[in-house]
Amino acid sequence: MLANYLPVLIFLAVATALAVVLLGVGTILGRIGARYRGDAQKASAYECGFEPFEDMRLRFDVRYYLVAILFIVFDLEIAFLFPWAVSLRETGRFGLGVMGVFLVILTVGFIYEWKKGALEWD
């Protein structure tokens, strides 16, 4: 029975060891780098060679989040379309109908965001 779980245990041991090594290297390099910080010019925020225009803690426009959500939705749609296309012969007409409903719901959501102006940037 241990032979079944041995590859998983080896994988977990290697992953844990790698995480500990990477965290240790990062900590050591961070402490070494703290000694050589440089001047205030190097520590300042960099924005294409210009001084920062505004405070960095300003809120993003809500349209940014809407576009991000739209991207995630359509990215997940593609992730669901690949397995469906592979198993279309096994699912038959029922699978085709279910995927059709799924695509209609996503299309309605896309049209809703389009009509609300979430994709327009002023």
Image: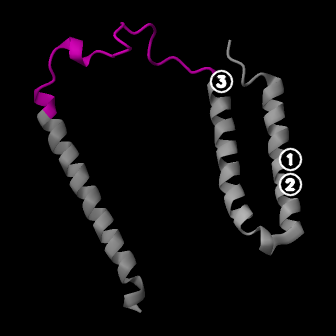
Q: Quadrant of the C terminus?
A: top right
Q: Viewer-nearest of labels 2 and 3?
A: 2
Query: Which percent across, then down, holds residue 105?
Result: 84, 46
Disc 1, disc 2: CB below 8 Å?
A: yes
Which one is earlier in the sequence, the residue at label 2 or at label 3?
A: 3
**Residue carrying label 1:** 104
Read off the magenta span.
33-61
- Dividing the picture into quadrants, the one containing residue 99 is bottom right
Query: Which percent across, then down, holds residue 92?
Result: 85, 70
- Give, as a three-letter code, the residue at label 2: Gly
As measured in the structure, the alpha-carbon distance from the residue carrying label 3 to the one carrying label 1 is: 25 Å
**Residue carrying label 3:** 62
Query: Which percent across, then down, holds residue 104?
Result: 86, 47
Residue found 81% across the figure and 24% down from its top: 116
Q: Is residue 25 magenta?
A: no
**Residue carrying label 2:** 100
Which one is earlier in the sequence, the residue at label 3 or at label 1?
A: 3
Give the SS element for disc 3: helix
